[in-house]
Image (cartoon, helix red, strand yellow):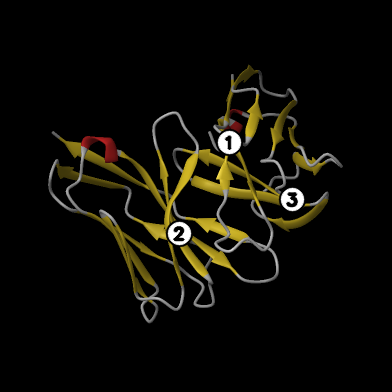
Amino acid sequence: GEDVEQSLFLSVREGDSSVINCTYTDSSSTYLYWYKQEPGAGLQLLTYIFSNMDMKQDQRLTVLLNKKDKHLSLRIADTQTGDSAIYFCAEDRPGGYQKVTFGIGTKLQVIP
Amino acid sequence: DSGVTQTPKHLITATGQRVTLRCSPRSGDLSVYWYQQSLDQGLQFLIQYYNGEERAKGNILERFSAQQFPDLHSELNLSSLELGDSALYFCASSVRGGDTGELFFGEGSRLTVL
């Protein structure tokens, strides 16, 4: 299928860890991305992982990739109220030109 | 500021009308993408242009069309508008062959069809 799937909503308490999950469709995808959309703004690349990696850590963010299950996750440590946003998983399908397919987005609500 | 400019930011129009949304990509970016974001369907890929040519097509309705001009700006034309076309329309740009394939998004054009 064409869909990148994510849950719609996640609520966590400030200071806890957040884990946002995603399943993608194309095992030949080169890059997998997490984009963040703050209220009233466009999407902004948060982090990405190359398909030959299992894990990538960037400060409070940890991306885990399970290629066998086509599962991608984003862990945010010590979640802050400023992390409240919609998080989009996306895959970049090969073929000479980019065609990035996005999930529906997971709305993260951080409770103070 | 992503460097991608979209106009207008907000647009209210009536069913049956036609509108044009405009996008100026980041300086040097050859690829332009259009996405539609609605509450029930998330972010839907519409169409991609590279250096003036159409390169990929997604869930774009026949009532919609787009083009990329020699100066690399792009326009998305929406005609015979229906209530269901109300959405946020994003333009994004990227550098072909860039290391990570990062897309840079504009702030969107919010279309309301009454």
Amino acid type, label 3: Leu
SS type, badge 1: loop
Question: Which residue reaches farthest bottom?
Answer: A68
Question: Measuring 65% from the left and 22% from the top, which residue is drawn there?
Answer: B8
Question: Which residue reaches farthest right?
Answer: B70
Label 3 is found on which chain of the structure? Answer: B
Question: Measuring 48% from the left and 42% from the top, which residue is drawn there?
Answer: A43
Residue denoted by label 1 = B106
Question: Measuring 28% from the left and 41% from the top, which residue is drawn there?
Answer: A83
Residue denoted by label 2 = A33
Q: Is residue A78 above or below residue A4?
A: above
Q: Is the C terminus of chain A in the top left, top right, bottom left or bottom right quadrant?
A: top left
Amino acid type, label 1: Gly
SS type, badge 2: strand
The image quarter containing residue A52 is bottom left
Distance from disc 2 to disc 1, alpha carbons, whole Å, reads: 18 Å
Q: Position of residue A60 (x, y in %)?
A: 25, 53
Q: Is residue B89 above or below residue A75?
A: above
Label 2 is found on which chain of the structure? Answer: A
Specify whether B17 is left or right of A26.
Answer: right
Q: Position of residue B97 (x, y in %)?
A: 67, 63
Residue denoted by label 3 = B30
Specify whether A11 is left or right of A39.
Answer: left
Q: Position of residue A38 (x, y in %)?
A: 39, 35
Q: Residues within 10 Å of mark 2 (few under 14, many from 20)?
A: many
Amino acid type, label 2: Tyr
The image quarter containing residue B67 is top right
Q: Position of residue B49 (x, y in %)?
A: 75, 51
Q: Are marks 2 and 1 on the same chain?
A: no
Tally the marks. 3
Q: In the rendered structure, which disc, 1 or 3, sits on the residue that comes first in sequence? A: 3
Instruction: Return the mark for residue B18.
Output: none
